[in-house]
Image (tube, rainbow, N blue to C red):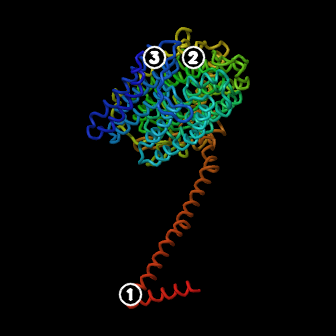
């Protein structure tokens, strides 16, 4: 293979970003081609590289960048089936996002900078995927972090966007600090930062501190991939433009942490304790995020919590020792989650609100956005995990991996011994993943039914003239309206949906034959076992039916004129001069019961962090500010005042009289003579 091909994959989007920033303001007509063409070409080149590399092959090339006095830092590639598969996903999703953004942010005056940041974001993820050196990988890792800060805060006029971008940056940096030490320690133990050397050292058992290294790396993964306890930034990041959410959630930032653990899985297999920690982290993340998703009113926050939970599935597969299943679900999820966010953008464009309760009051919404309605339905079925969609196969692969790990037969596929995976990790993942399958189906069905199929039932008269656009007290991450809801969605916002619908429906079947997807990865089987297939699908069907039953019950109760179970369910009619208040039939309240309020607010994790960390840090900052301004500056000002006073005293001696100067000189000479004589 010509090494220029993989080199161009991350280089072209980076050059496109520089060109867009350079000429975007001066020549706005060039901004869109400069945003789309380099990313699209990189996507094609990534596919070409994957095809040329083939299955079961590894391509490594490295050039020393600089001596360090220790392990050298090299610039090079480490390409295998995992990097090939994920790079194709990154290119596909990034191209769809760039095309979609040309219409979604058509009139945005800051579109050139936005497009440049998306291109740079894409280049950074390509660098992470292709890099053969952990330090160079870290560069791409951190570039994605700073790009996410600017993209989430794109609408900096909004206080929500400013605070969300700052929160995302700080929370992920909180994980990146131990992550950095983990990379340094790993390089020191292995004697090299090259991925191939690190894997060889792990396989040969030459790492002196595997548990410490794994736990330090997991801190960075928890931050970047939004796992408990560093997951809180991702739901708030919905204040950014919707296409950015699709890019972050589907193919770049949150996928980077999972990819890193999959790439370095031999290191983690050396520490059973780290695998148990990863399993617990994944279990809490899966169940907690699914409960939160079931209570959200903001469409994008539902999808954000969904992403957190699905990342928990991937982390759970890694804790079970099966990186094939994890990456399979990563790619499958990347396709249908990008589709969900882009379809959500179309719906938000038409409804002019993020609130699913407000959407339920819009008559004929699903007829106004047929492309988004059908593609979102396809993506939600894939999210639930029903056959034959891709989500079914990838979710069942995770459950199968957990089942084998629980039985002491982990599917490590030659990466390490099966005995390296504790059975406890398998049981933790298996039980939590099964429960999450039920909850996922429930919140997905709730979203679809409430947003598109809820009848509005009048229960009283005298509704107010000025009406809110979402439920009072519900977390809400609005973004500035980029498009006019009175106009139909342009083709640039519709055809990416159908492009992403193809892998959402068809990608899963590539796992059925051993010479297809499994041959590209580690060669193990990705076929679901009969037990997990029946169990997982059955739980998904039960969850969807529970949501449907609760929705029908609430709808019937409203139709009969009986009050809703909770006053928070009341939301006003959306448009015109309303004559009646409307109550939305929300099955989430019925299913969660007393947990609905805590789940809506993330079980108070943000409030806890605010009490334990934010307020003490703010108080400490206030103390430092006081000491700086009232103590340090007082001494500084005192020095200046003292110098001024001394100058005034000295100035009194400057009379301009020569006789006075001679008298003082004579007195000084006499004084010195006396002192010398004595």
**Quarter placement of the C terminus:** bottom right
Residue of label 1: 655
Q: Quadrant of residue 88?
A: top left
Give the farthest residue toward the front.
677
Q: Quadrant of residue 417?
A: top right
Left-right relation of 530 to 636: right
Percent x, y for residue 665? 44, 86
Q: Is residue 112 above or below residue 46?
A: below
Residue of label 3: 50
Q: Residues within 10 Å of mark 2 (few under 14, many from 20)?
A: many
Percent x, y for residue 520? 53, 14
Q: Is residue 261 above or below residue 477?
A: above
Q: Quadrant of residue 567?
A: top right
Residue found at x 41% / y 29%: 97
Q: Residues within 10 Å of mark 3 (few under 14, many from 20)?
A: many
> Of callouts 3 and 2, which one flags the residue occurring earlier in the amino acid sequence?
3
- Residue at disc 2, secondary structure: helix
Left-right relation of 521 to 279: left
* Residue 585 in sight here: no
- Residue at disc 1, secondary structure: loop
- Give the spatial CA distance, label 3 vs label 2: 22 Å
**Front disc: 3 or 1:** 1
- Give the spatial CA distance, label 2 vs label 1: 98 Å
> Of callouts 2 and 1, which one flags the residue occurring earlier in the amino acid sequence?
2
């Amino acid at each position: 293979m010509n090494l220029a091909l993989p080199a161009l994959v991350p280089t072209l989007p980076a050059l496109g970003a520089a060109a867009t920033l350079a000429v975007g303001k001066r020549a706005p007509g060039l901004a869109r081609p400069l945003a789309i063409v380099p990313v699209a070409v990189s996507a094609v080149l990534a596919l070409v590289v994957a095809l040329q590399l083939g299955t079961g092959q590894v391509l490594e090339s490295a050039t020393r960048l600089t001596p360090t006095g220790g392990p050298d830092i090299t610039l090079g590639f480490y390409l295998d089936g995992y990097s090939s598969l994920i790079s194709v996903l990154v290119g596909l999703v990034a191209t769809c996002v760039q095309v979609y953004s040309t219409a979604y942010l058509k009139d945005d005056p800051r579109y050139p900078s936005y497009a440049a940041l998306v291109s740079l974001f894409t280049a950074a993820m390509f660098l992470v995927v292709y890099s053969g050196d952990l330090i160079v990988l870290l560069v791409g890792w951190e570039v994605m972090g700073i790009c996410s800060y600017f993209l989430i805060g794109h609408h900096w006029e909004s206080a929500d966007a400013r605070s969300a971008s700052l929160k995302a940056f700080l929370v992920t940096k909180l994980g990146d600090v131990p992550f950095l030490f983990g990379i340094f320690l790993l390089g020191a133990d292995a004697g090299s930062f090259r991925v191939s050397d690190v894997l060889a050292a792990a396989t040969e058992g030459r790492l002196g501190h595997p548990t410490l290294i794994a736990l330090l790396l997991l801190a960075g993964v928890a931050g970047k991939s939004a796992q408990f306890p560093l997951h809180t930034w991702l739901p708030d990041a919905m204040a950014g433009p919707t296409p950015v959410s699709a890019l972050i959630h589907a193919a770049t930032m949150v996928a980077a942490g999972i990819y890193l653990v999959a790439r370095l899985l031999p290191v983690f297999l050396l520490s059973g304790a780290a695998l148990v920690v990863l399993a617990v982290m994944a279990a809490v993340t899966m169940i907690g995020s699914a409960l939160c998703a079931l209570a959200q009113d903001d469409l994008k926050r539902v999808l954000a919590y969904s992403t957190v939970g699905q990342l928990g599935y991937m982390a759970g597969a890694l804790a079970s020792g099966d990186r094939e299943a994890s990456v399979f679900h990563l790619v499958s999820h990347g396709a249908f989650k990008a589709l969900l966010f882009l379809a959500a953008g179309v719906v938000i464009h038409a409804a002019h609100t993020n609130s699913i309760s407000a959407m339920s009051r819009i008559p004929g919404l699903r007829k106004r956005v047929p492309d988004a309605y059908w593609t979102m339905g396809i993506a939600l079925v894939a999210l639930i995990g029903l056959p034959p969609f891709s989500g079914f196969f990838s979710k069942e692969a995770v459950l199968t991996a957990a089942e084998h790990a629980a039985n002491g037969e982990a599917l490590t596929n030659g990466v390490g011994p099966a005995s390296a995976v504790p059975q406890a990790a398998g049981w933790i993942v298996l039980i939590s993943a099964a429960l999450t399958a039920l909850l996922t189906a429930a919140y997905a069905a709730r979203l679809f039914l409430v947003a598109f199929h809820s009848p509005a039932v009048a229960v009283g008269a005298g509704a107010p003239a000025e009406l809110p656009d979402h439920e009072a007290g519900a977390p809400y991450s609005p973004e500035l309206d980029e498009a006019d809801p009175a106009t139909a969605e342009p083709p640039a916002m519709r055809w990416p949906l159908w492009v992403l619908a193809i892998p959402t429906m068809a990608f899963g079947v590539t796992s059925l034959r051993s010479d297809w997807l499994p041959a590209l990865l580690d060669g193990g089987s990705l076929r679901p076992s009969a037990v997990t297939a029946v169990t997982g699908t059955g739980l998904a069907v039960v969850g969807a039916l529970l949501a449907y039953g609760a929705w029908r019950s609430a709808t019937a109760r409203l139709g009969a004129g009986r009050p809703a179970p909770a006053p928070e369910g009341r939301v006003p009619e959306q448009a015109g001069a309303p004559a009646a208040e409307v109550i939305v039939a929300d099955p989430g309240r019925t299913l969660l019961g007393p947990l609905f309020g805590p789940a809506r607010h993330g079980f108070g994790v943000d409030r806890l962090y605010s009490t334990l960390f934010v307020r003490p840090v703010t108080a400490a900052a206030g103390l430092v500010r006081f000491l700086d301004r009232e103590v340090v500056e007082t001494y500084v000002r005192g020095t200046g005042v003292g110098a001024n006073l001394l100058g005034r005293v000295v100035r009194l001696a400057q009379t301009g009289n020569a006789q006075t100067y001679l008298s003082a000189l004579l007195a000084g000479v006499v004084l010195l003579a006396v002192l010398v004589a004595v």
